[in-house]
Every structure is written in structure tokens, then in C-alpha cells.
Image: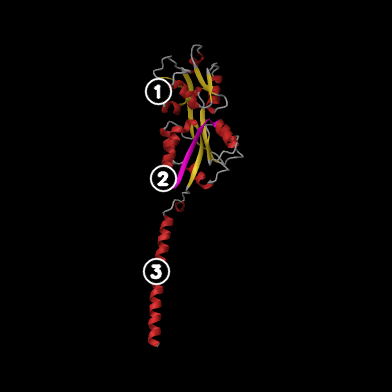
Amino acid sequence: MSSARSLRRASAAVLTTALLASLAACGDADDSARDDSPKSQGRPSARLTVLAASSLTDAFETAGAAYEKANPGTEITFSFAGSQELAAQVGQGAPADALVTADTTTMDGLKADTGTPTVIAGNRLVIAVAEGNPEKIDELGDLAGAQLKVVLAAPEVPAGRYSEQILDAQKIEVKPVSQEPNVRAVLSKVELGEADAGLVYRTDAAAAADKVDAVAIPDSQNAVARYPAATLKTSRNPEAAAAFVSWLSGPQAQKILKDAGFQQP
């Protein structure tokens, strides 16, 4: 009887040891899986919606792809529009996680809805003209010509305010044939031949270099557009939104913006 009990105890000990080893192995495997997850590496996974000024379209499409590649598990959807339209969307409670405008004035008006903004880039205006510059436009003063069809962004749009600012400073009176809701609409009018010239950001003209030419405006007669980025307080993914906004000031995003023609902040 004693020998039988000893055998049963020995068998139980062997089974217990095997079970503990198996559990330990499972635990190691689980730990390994957790270590490989984006969140464990400080990269919160989420689906983000970013409201961004229309002049950022090309650069941000590149930036978004780069961010998703570097941060598996995060998907970014951009909604591009004039900054004043974006502000209206935020005011109406549009579901979004971050906001980037083309001016600090618009962002400052949304302090109750955003986190602390950070300027991520700068820009300047140029005169967009048809390819080959058939109207021979060389400077701002030429836009006052009665025979020219000039298109500007509307005054409530950042690009429109900057345009008004530099024209007023030079005492140049321009009567636009239309005032557009965003700077990309101004560019489109010139591209389609519906306008002889329009004031757009340097980056917009560069993105359409195969369709329009850009006439530079001296810095002394120009304005600097500044692009602030901030998280939205209504974000359902505040950590992931903050991570993306922070990344925009980092070296990879700054190189993308610089390559697109934006100035460093």
C-alpha cells in the first residue's frame, strides 16, 4: 500500500510540474504578443479624423501614409476645407480628433474646443498664372489691370485675409471676378482658364506646377501664413490624437512639409 501511495504522489508531482511549465510557456507567449502591440510601444492604436486646411492636402496625404506605416493600428482620415469651414464644423460638434488651420486667428477663436496649439509650418503667397504667363504678370501691381480676370479667396478665408493684407499694404486695388471658399478653389479657377491670375500659397502653385506658373512676391510685400495644429477636446481617442499632433513637429513630418514647399515653423 505504501508503495502504491508513493507511486501516485510521484505521478502527481510529474503532472503538476508539466502543468506549471505549460502555463509559464503560455504566459511567455502572451507577454511576447503584448510586447509587439502598438500600444505597448507607446503608439496608441485608433481611427483618427483630422480636419485640415485645404492647402495642406498634398503634404498631409503623404504625411498620413507615413504616420500609418510607422504606427501600425492607427488609421487617419483627413477632411480638407477652408479654415473657416473647419471652424464651423468644430462649432457644430463634428466628430473629429485634431484640427490644423492655415492661420492662428481661426485657431485662437476655438480655444474652448481645442488643446494647446503648436505651429507646425509656415507659408507665403504667390501669384498663380496660366502656364507660360501669357498676360505677362510680373508683380502685385499688375493685378490692378482692368483687363485682367483675377480671383481671390473670400475675406473670411485665411488666404483671403492674407491677400487683402498685402494688397492694402501696397495700396493696390483689385476687383476680383470671384471670391472663393478656399485657396484650392482659387487655384482651380486659374488651372481651368477661368481666371488670368489668383493669389494662392506657394505650396499650392508648386503642387500644380504642370498646369500653372508662379510669380514670386518679394518678402517685403508678402505675408507669412502660420499653421497651428491642436487636438480637439471632443476626441474619442485623445492619446492617439495627441501623438499625431506631436509627430507633426517631429523630423519626419517636418521633412515632408519642407519637401512640399512649406517653411519651417
Disc 3 is placed on an element classified as helix
Q: Amino acid at mark 2?
A: Ala
Residue under numbered circle 2: 70
Residue 108, image x and y in percent? 59, 35
Quadrant assignment, res 26: bottom left
Residue 67, image x and y in percent? 43, 42
Camera-side residue of 91 and 251: 91
Q: Amino acid at mark 3?
A: Ala
Quarter the N terminus occupies: bottom left
Q: Amino acid at mark 1?
A: Lys
Residue under numbered circle 3: 21
Camera-side residue of 125 and 178: 178
**Residue 106 visible within the image:** yes
Residue occupying the point 46% across, 33% down: 57
Circles 1, 3 touching at the beta carbon (< 8 Å)? no
Segment tinted magenta in the rendering:
68-83
